[in-house]
Image (tube, helix red, strand yellow):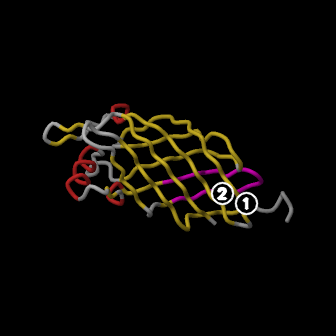
Amino acid sequence: MSQFANAQNISEKSSAITVDGTSTLHDWTMSASSSTFSGTVSGNTITNVKFSIPVANLKSTKGKMMDNKAYKALKSEKAPNITFTASSINIGSGNATGKLTIAGVTKNSTFPVTVTKKGNVYTITGTENVKMSDFGMEKPGFMGIKTGDDVKIKVTIVAQ
């Protein structure tokens, strides 16, 4: 196939998202396997990158009370989605630079990402460490137990 073939629109076929954090009592994880992703492949670049996950898709191993506290901290009623947009990311290993929106607050964000291509299937993996306070979020707590400010977001998307 020629490198100069027409651009190919791709969209998510599957995804795995985890958010890991800490608290004064125990570490915690929320995960989701449903989000939306789209982009356009041209040569060795994916352009017009758009990723979105509904906050309500995130579920914790600690149950509904933890979920509800997280949704409140994420301001899910006013900001129902976490999104990332970038003008482009390169196939291979590098950095993705774009706009990350959490709890209705948008920040410029750069984080390491790896994009592998197998046939016409693209696997995109990225990890970003964020501070809840940077996005205007109050750290959830319950009966004196407080979560830490730092969380790690890991995303793997398979698109075609």
Residue at image location 22% in from the left, 48% down from the top: 69
Residue 57 sits in quarter: bottom left
Q: Amino acid at mark 1?
A: Ala
29 or 55, nearer to the observer:
29
- Left or right: 155 in relation to 70: right
Residue at image location 44% in from the left, 42% down from the top: 152
Helix, strand or loop for disc 2: strand
Residue 141 locus on image (x, y percent): 20, 40
**Within 10 Å of the Cα at label 2, are there few (<14), some (14-19), or many (20+) other Cα atoms?**
some
144 or 116, nearer to the observer:
144
Viewport quadrant of the N terminus: bottom right
Residue interval drawn in magenta: 37-51
Residue 55 locus on image (x, y percent): 34, 54
Residue 97 locus on image (x, y percent): 58, 38
Tag shown at residue 40:
2
Looking at the image, the residue that sits furthest to the right is: 2
- Left or right: 31 in relation to 72: right
Residue 74 locus on image (x, y percent): 30, 45
73 or 61, nearer to the observer:
61
Looking at the image, the residue that sits furthest to the front is: 25
Q: Is 27 within the magenta?
A: no
Overall secondary structure of the magenta section: strand
Q: Are marks 1 and 2 in contact (CB under 8 Å)?
A: yes
Helix, strand or loop for disc 1: loop
Residue at image location 64% in from the left, 66% down from the top: 160
**Within 10 Å of the Cα at label 1, are there few (<14), some (14-19), or many (20+) other Cα atoms?**
some
Q: Amino acid at mark 2?
A: Thr
Give the CA distance from mark 1 to mark 2.
Answer: 6 Å
Tag shown at residue 7:
1
Residue at image location 28% in from the left, 39% down from the top: 23
Label 1 or label 2, whichever comes before in sequence order: 1
